[in-house]
Image (tube, helix red, strand yellow):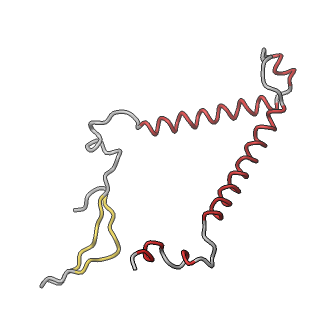
Amino acid sequence: MEEPHSVNSPRTILSFSKRGRTTTASVSFVDPNDEKSNSGEHGPKPSEVYGFVGSITTVVATAIYLAWAYIPEPWLHSIGIFYYPSRYWALAVPSYAMVIIVLAVIFYIGLNFMSTPPPTSLTTMFVYFTLLCR
């Protein structure tokens, strides 16, 4: 009888014994939700909590940003919000972020080109340490 969490491989393993029978290869995995193997640990993992809090924070921050960027000023004043950054920053911050990302990619590619030897160099054909060992 097989284990409850096993995977049967379609590849068979040939037996070179006198019986000459073939057996099927199987791999078993430990189920993290199994209560027998998880009895000493209680509650969610920290990475799960950080991921959940991060996703909720991202959704809330995006909603606040979009509300600040698109709701007219009289509506914000009517609900009691009088202090907020200039609307200039609603376009400036994403624009600056995109320019910084593009410049970082260009800088990274340029740095790789500068650190790579030219195609005519012998170091592209031979390793430096092999030349020392001769």
Residue 54, horizontal then vertical, whole percent: 56, 36
Viewer-side residue, 71 vs 50: 50
Residue 116, horizontal then vertical, whole percent: 60, 67
**Which residue corresponds to the image point at 24% horizontal and 81% vertical from the top-left?**
14
Q: In which quarter of the image is residue 79?
A: top right
Q: Which residue lies furthest to the top in this view?
A: 80
Residue 7 vs residue 110: left or right? left
Q: In this view, does 67 lie above or below 95?
A: above
Viewer-side residue, 6 vs 113: 113
Residue 75, horizontal then vertical, whole percent: 84, 21
**Which residue corresponds to the image point at 29% horizontal and 41% vertical from the top-left?**
38
**Which residue corresponds to the image point at 14% horizontal and 82% vertical from the top-left?**
17
**Which residue corresponds to the image point at 31% horizontal and 45% vertical from the top-left?**
34
Residue 81 vs residue 125: left or right? right
Viewer-side residue, 75 vs 62: 62
Residue 115 vs residue 100: left or right? left
Q: In which quarter of the image is the N terminus?
A: bottom left
Q: In this view, does 121 lie above or below 88?
A: below
Residue 88, horizontal then vertical, whole percent: 84, 32
Residue 125 vs residue 87: left or right? left
Q: In which quarter of the image is the C terminus?
A: bottom left
